[in-house]
Image: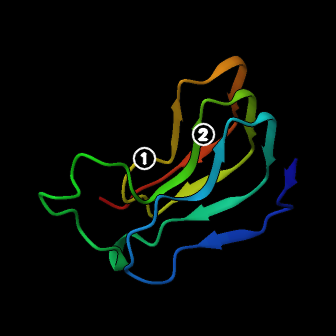
Amino acid sequence: TIYGYGATIKVVNSTLIRSMLYFGSETNIEIFGVTFDMNMSNQTTYSDATASSFYNVGVYCNASSNISICDCKFTNLYNDSIFLYQCTGNIKILNNYFFSPN
């Protein structure tokens, strides 16, 4: 369980990253009250070689179950804020704020 209490996680450079938070084959993931600032204006743009992959995602969950992402902010989005792949169980995405300037 991650309680942000208003804390901000911010991408600070132009390096391609998979995600700010990655969970693989995890159970009972809970994220509350975190601000994810993707810092879009400083991110590297996709090339033809990287366009088919997912990069610069806020929260990436792969083959995980029972996920709650609540009361978070996703700002200056470059790509996907939340990406769930082959996830099962009880999934709650509640009371989040999403903003991208473009």
Report the side of 75 relative to 88 (left or right). Answer: left
Q: Quadrant of residue 23?
A: top right
For mark 2, what is the residue? Answer: 61
| Farthest-out residue, left | 48
For mark 1, what is the residue? Answer: 80
**Badge 1: how crowded within 10 Å, few (<14), some, or many (20+)?**
some
* Number of the label disc, if any, that sits on residue 33: none
Residue found 45% across the figure and 66% down from its top:
17
Figure check: 35 above or below 33: below
Q: Residue 85: x, y in percent?
A: 51, 30
The C terminus lies in quadrant: bottom left
Q: Amino acid at mark 2?
A: Cys
Q: Residue 87: x, y in percent?
A: 61, 24
Instruction: Please state which of residues 30 and 65 is positioned toward the viewer in this rendering.
Output: 65
Instruction: Please state which of residues 54 and 63 is positioned toward the viewer in this rendering.
Output: 63
| Farthest-out residue, front | 25
How many numbered marks does the figure carry?
A: 2
| Farthest-out residue, top | 89
**Badge 2: how crowded within 10 Å, few (<14), some, or many (20+)?**
many
Figure check: 85 above or below 51: above
Q: Quadrant of residue 44?
A: bottom left
Residue found 23% across the figure and 68% down from its top:
45
Q: Residue 26: x, y in percent?
A: 74, 37
Q: Amino acid at mark 1?
A: Asp
> If you read the primary sequence from the N terminus, does the residue marked by circle 2 or circle 1 appear first?
2
Q: Residue 79: x, y in percent?
A: 37, 52
Residue found 49% across the figure and 66% down from its top:
38
Residue found 68% across the figure and 35% down from its top:
25
Q: Secondary structure at mark 1?
A: loop
Q: Quadrant of residue 28?
A: top right
Q: How far apart, in angstroms, are the residues tagged by discs 2 and 1?
A: 12 Å
Instruction: Please state which of residues 77 and 46 is positioned toward the viewer in this rendering.
Output: 46
